[in-house]
Amino acid sequence: MSQVRTYNSPMREEKARETHEAILCALFELMDSATAADEISMEAIAQKAGVQRRTVFRHFATKDDLLAAFWPWLNARIGASTTPRTPKDIVDGPRQAFPRFDMHDAAIRSSLHSRTGREMRMGTVAGRRANFRRALAPAISSLQPAEAEKVEALAHLLFSASAWEILKDYGGLTGAQAGETASWALEVILSAVTPGHSPAEVTNQRDKP
């Protein structure tokens, strides 16, 4: 009985990981360029990554797959949490993330305003809403559904790259100042909808068994 032989599988796996990372880095560099076109083609990504176009499609079957992988990869790269688990995670989110957005200003703005960036972000909306709803549950469980929806919507707005950009461009703030401002606003909102609790008490709540 013949055996199926494998050739340097650990090396192949490492090479595949390196190529996967190179493709994501290439898209990031294209988005981080102020002169990048609104439409970033798979050909441009392949050229930037130093691989052939078909190699990109071996790692990402479609452009949608690439974009779906890119947004969490970018957030991990800049150290921004995409999965808040508690009200405190949401309140602290802008304070932690907005200064880091400043370090990748062009890429973040490209994700907001380019077609490629919008497609990328819209693919994450359903998951983001579910994460925020679970994280906010301890602070808004006593609210009527319509009121809870308003708080959730405000949390999405204030803990977002859009809020970072508006507070910087219209408020004249730095990323750090914008983060402190958005986090403060979230503290005030959660305190207001949780009677008898201070902002610190609200944001320190944890899900109860």
Image (tube, rainbow, N blue to C red):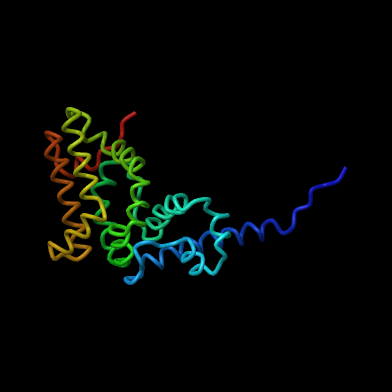
Location of the N terminus by quadrant is top right
Whether 185 is drawn above or below 8: the answer is above
Q: How many numbered discs sit on the rendered protein?
A: 0
Q: Position of residue 62 (x, y in %)?
A: 49, 51
Residue depicted at x 59% and y 59%: 16
Q: Position of residue 17 (x, y in %)?
A: 57, 58
Comparing 150 with 139, the one in front is: 150
- Residue 11, by quadrant, is bottom right
Give left or right: position of 17 versus 10. Answer: left
Give left or right: position of 153 versus 82. Answer: left
Comparing 141 with 69, the one in front is: 69
Residue depicted at x 47% and y 64%: 45
Comparing 101 with 96, the one in front is: 101
Residue depicted at x 86% and y 46%: 2
Q: Position of residue 59 (x, y in %)?
A: 55, 54
Whether 77 is drawn above or below 48: the answer is above
- Residue 41, by quadrant, is bottom left
Location of the C terminus by quadrant is top left
In the picture as drawn, the residue positioned furthest to the right comes out as 1
- Residue 153, by quadrant, is top left
Q: Position of residue 136 (x, y in %)?
A: 26, 38
